[in-house]
Image (cartoon, helix red, strand yellow):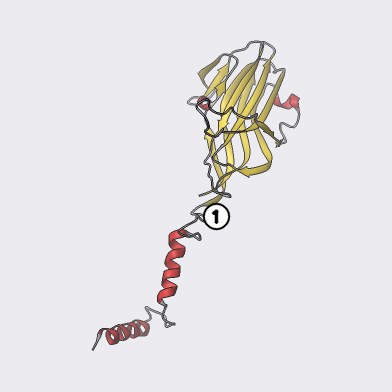
């Protein structure tokens, strides 16, 4: 019995035992096509796929208070009101204080890949007295390209429109004494490109007696990689 006859008889034995279902033989070309689909996930050797290994519409990334920038005011690392919770506390003082979070989820140079930014949550608490105002802004800037030795200046950031959650629809609700979880839902979400630079910039106007506790923020996005 030659090798071909042996392989044929082995397959027939497997079919008879129920281990293999009878069907047409798979051609070598079909095997090559399947291997290519697995290797390139729908793309090709000269281009990337628009899909990917993961498409998850409910991904979040939390940024702790230590990730924020503070351009005005005195901010101190402080234990929260509940043991083992932590925040940054702004000392009461009459001023316009700046709280800025760089929002840095995964980015990608390929269209429709990386992070599709949809909303941002901010946790904070106001004590002693109401603020005069609290105004959040989502800014989109662009990293400048390389050029001459003197470099290229940053272009002006562009404010991105958003809507507030039902608990923060008025200015008075946003700056009132109490614990806050504020959600900013971006009106037109977008896929973050490699040169996108996103900031959550919160202007906090303190009348001189308000204490502001920052517990962190969270970016919510679709992830495709």
**Whether residue 144 is situated above or below residue 2 in the rendered picture:** above
Q: Quadrant of residue 92?
A: top right
Q: In what element is the residue under mark 1?
A: loop
Q: Nearer the viewer, residue 113 or 181?
A: 113
The image shows residue 55 at horizontal and vertical percentages of 54, 52
Q: Is residue 6 left or right of residue 217?
A: left
Look at 69% across and 25% down and name the residue there: 135
Residue at 30 percent of width and 82 percent of height: 7
Residue 20 percent across, percent down from the top left: 38, 79
Question: Can you identify the residue that label 1 sits on?
Answer: 50
Q: Nearer the viewer, residue 35 or 63?
A: 35
Q: Residue furthest left?
A: 1
Examine the image and state in which quarter residue 140 appears.
top right
Look at the picture and state if 69 lies above or below 49.
above
Q: Is residue 198 left or right of residue 6?
A: right
Residue 86 image position (x, y, % from top left): 51, 24
Percent x, y for residue 74?
56, 13
Is 140 drawn above or below residue 134 in the view shown?
below
109, 65: nearer the viewer: 109
Query: Within 10 Å of the Cα at label 1, are there few (<14), some (14-19), or many (20+) other Cα atoms?
Result: some
Q: Quadrant of the N terminus?
A: bottom left
Q: Residue at x 65, y 43 (%)?
A: 189
């Amino acid at each position: 019995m030659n090798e071909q006859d042996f392989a044929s008889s082995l397959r027939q034995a497997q079919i008879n035992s129920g281990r293999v279902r009878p069907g047409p033989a798979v051609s070598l070309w079909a095997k090559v096509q399947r291997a290519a689909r697995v290797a390139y996930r729908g793309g090709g050797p000269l281009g990337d796929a628009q899909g990917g290994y993961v498409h998850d519409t409910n991904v979040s990334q939390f940024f702790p208070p230590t990730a924020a920038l503070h351009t005005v005011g005195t901010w101190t690392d402080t234990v929260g009101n509940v043991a083992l919770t932590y925040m940054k506390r702004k000392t009461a003082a009459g001023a316009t204080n700046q709280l800025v979070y760089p929002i840095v989820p995964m980015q990608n140079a390929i269209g429709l890949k990386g992070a599709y930014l949809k909303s941002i949550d901010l946790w904070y608490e106001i004590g002693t007295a109401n603020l005069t105002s609290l105004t959040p802004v989502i800014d989109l800037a662009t990293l400048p390209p390389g050029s001459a030795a003197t470099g290229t200046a940053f272009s002006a950031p562009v404010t991105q429109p958003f809507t507030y959650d039902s608990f923060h629809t008025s200015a008075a609700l946003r700056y009132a004494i109490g614990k806050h979880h504020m959600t900013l839902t971006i009106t037109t979400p977008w896929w973050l490109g490699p040169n996108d630079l996103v900031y959550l910039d919160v202007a906090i106007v303190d009348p001189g007696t308000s204490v502001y506790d920052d517990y962190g923020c969270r970016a919510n996005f679709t992830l495709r990689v």
